[in-house]
């Protein structure tokens, strides 16, 4: 179809050029014949010969040679000089001299110069007839013309060149069409327009149907394509096509992963409120063609993994308690076998009262059942590793707070990760101790975890994803703590504790309960509570320890 189109265009141009050239050739012939006729009519020798004819001499003797020289020199086919009556004095064929002129002469006899196409003795010709004047009188007529055959011969020469040009244009167009078509098929992998259209439809359906985020970046790391899931996972507003990755306002580690040249496989990155698994792969084809990035939402899975870890901790704690209970039971049985029943009863009673008293103290200090279970489990784990975990005396029950606390799952994430990091830091530290403070304050919830370990390194962002006291590339817990705090508009601060060690303080806003008076929520009823809230450090005495 492309070659046919080129052929039609070239043929149309050739026909137009031929018609234009023929019209120009006929017009040029008229101008040439007219110039010759006017020049002969204005020649003094011609007028002198006509005067001699009036005196009885034969004008053909002088005019015939002159007319032939002019005809040959000017390139016309005939120059005929005749009397006013139309009798020829000159003619290319001497035998035709004296015969009447074949053609119209009436306009010339009226003093006009005119042109016409007429079939005479030489065949069809374009001729110009002009009057020959002497002292204002018309004493003869001059006609010069070019045959149509001569014009056709000239046009045939031009048409031959035109045919070569048209053939060259057709060949060039065919070769260009082949080259363009081959290049197009190479770029489209041999698919035609219908296949490309069908692939585009499938591409759009797959792009918006998959739940994973998909980004396509060009060589300058600008977004060329992003699906709905990718826009949602990165919290990008509106159309960001053409925007550079560095201008999206994403966290620095995630931006670095998207800008990297090397492939990324299952890297975990944090945004303001999500945990994302990032995979990237460069586009094949040589050069920096671009990158394809996939994003998976790992937030829920990470939360479930954290809960599973806590459940495993609880299981281990229960196993440890069962082991200790078995030891105590063996002790009681041995005392009974030794006949010391009273001592066995006293020993068992003391153990039960201690366990119940500690549980009651934690329940009273914390109030939130999920956090109570978390602290009891973490306390048992810490005890196994030689670490004492206490709830400080300035803690207050969360059940007393009338506002809306953050979800228990997020509180478990914050408190569980902080305690786990503290336990890891205190391993093999003599007299290891962790103090946990939970206290609702005006419009915010305070959570503090302090230890007496080696403390924090200076000049290091401990909340950066990938940092860990056990080495680079392992830390995620503290990054999740900061993510939860920022998600609710709170703050998290890491500092050196007053007695050494590390101290992490998290403050989370408390939303007013539905129908509560904000002014009343801002002013605590108990002045003692206000004074206690003003001292975030709180007393160091423990309400309970294990």
Image (cartoon, rainbow, N blue to C red):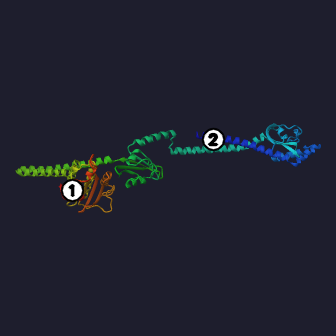
How far from the left and from the top, in percent, is residue 404? 27, 48
Q: Check disc 2 and report its element: helix, strand or loop.
A: helix
Quadrant housing the N terminus: top right
Out of 289 and 366, give the one closest to the viewer: 366
The residue under the point 34% across, 50% down is 273
Looking at the figure, which quarter contains the C terminus?
Answer: bottom left
Give the camera-side residue of 476 and 335.
476
> Residue 373: image x %, image y %?
21, 49
* Residue at position x 75%, y 43% in the image: 27
CA distance separating discs 1 and 2? 96 Å
Q: Residues within 10 Å of mark 1 (few under 14, many from 20)?
A: few
According to the picture, the residue beneath numbered tag 2 turns out to be 9
The answer to whether one can see residue 387 in this image is no
Q: Please give the residue where the numbered disc 1 appears in the rendered image.
A: 527
**In the figure, is residue 148 to the left or right of 336?**
right
Q: Position of residue 108 (x, y in %)?
A: 83, 41
The image shows residue 357 at horizontal and vertical percentages of 14, 51
């Amino acid at each position: 179809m492309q070659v046919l189109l080129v052929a039609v265009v070239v043929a149309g141009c050739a026909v137009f050029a031929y018609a234009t050239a023929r019209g120009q050739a006929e017009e040029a012939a008229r101008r040439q014949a007219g110039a010759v006729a006017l020049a002969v009519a204005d020649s003094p020798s011609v007028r002198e010969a006509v005067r001699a004819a009036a005196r009885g001499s034969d004008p053909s003797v002088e005019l015939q040679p002159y007319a032939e020289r002019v005809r040959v020199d000017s390139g016309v086919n005939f120059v005929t000089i005749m009397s006013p009556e139309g009798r020829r004095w000159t003619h290319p064929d001497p035998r035709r001299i004296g015969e009447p002129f074949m053609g119209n002469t009436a306009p010339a006899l009226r003093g006009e110069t005119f042109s016409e196409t007429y079939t005479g003795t030489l065949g069809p010709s374009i001729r110009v007839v002009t009057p020959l004047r002497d002292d204002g009188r018309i004493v003869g007529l001059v006609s010069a013309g070019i045959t149509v055959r001569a014009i056709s011969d000239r046009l045939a020469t031009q048409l031959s060149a035109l045919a070569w040009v048209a053939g060259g244009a057709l060949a060039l167009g065919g070769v260009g069409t082949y080259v363009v078509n081959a290049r197009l098929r190479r770029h489209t992998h041999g698919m035609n327009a219908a296949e490309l259209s069908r692939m585009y439809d499938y591409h759009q359906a797959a792009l918006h149907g998959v739940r994973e985020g998909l980004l396509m970046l060009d060589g300058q790391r600008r977004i060329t394509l992003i699906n709905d899931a990718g826009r949602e996972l990165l919290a990008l507003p509106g159309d960001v096509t053409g925007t550079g990755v560095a201008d999206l306002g994403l966290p620095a580690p995630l931006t670095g992963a998207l800008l990297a040249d090397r492939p990324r496989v299952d890297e975990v990155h944090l945004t303001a409120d999500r945990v994302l698994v990032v995979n990237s792969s460069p586009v094949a084809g040589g050069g920096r063609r671009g990158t394809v990035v996939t994003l998976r939402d790992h937030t829920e899975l990470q939360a479930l993994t954290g809960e599973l870890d806590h459940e495993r901790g609880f299981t281990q704690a229960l196993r440890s308690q069962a082991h200790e209970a078995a030891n105590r039971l063996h002790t009681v049985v041995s005392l009974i076998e030794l006949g010391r029943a009273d001592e066995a009863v006293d020993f068992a009673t003391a153990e039960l009262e201690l366990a119940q008293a500690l549980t009651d103290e934690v329940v009273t200090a914390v109030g939130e059942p999920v956090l109570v279970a978390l602290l009891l489990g973490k306390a048992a784990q810490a005890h196994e590793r030689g670490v004492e975990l206490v709830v400080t005396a300035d803690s207050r029950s969360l059940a007393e707070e009338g506002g809306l606390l953050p979800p228990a799952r997020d509180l478990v994430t914050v408190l569980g990760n902080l305690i786990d990091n503290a336990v890891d830091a205190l391993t093999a530290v003599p007299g290891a101790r962790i103090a946990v403070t939970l206290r609702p304050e005006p419009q915010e919830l305070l959570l503090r975890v302090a230890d007496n370990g080696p403390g924090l390194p200076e000049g290091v962002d401990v909340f950066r994803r990938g940092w860990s006291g056990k080495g680079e590339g392992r830390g995620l817990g503290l990054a999740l703590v900061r993510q939860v705090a920022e998600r609710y508009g709170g703050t998290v601060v890491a500092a050196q504790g007053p007695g050494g060690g590390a101290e992490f303080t998290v403050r989370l806003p408390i939303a007013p309960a539905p129908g509560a008076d904000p002014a009343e929520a801002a002013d605590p009823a108990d002045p003692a509570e206000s004074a206690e809230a003003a001292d975030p450090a709180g007393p160091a005495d423990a309400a309970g320890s294990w």
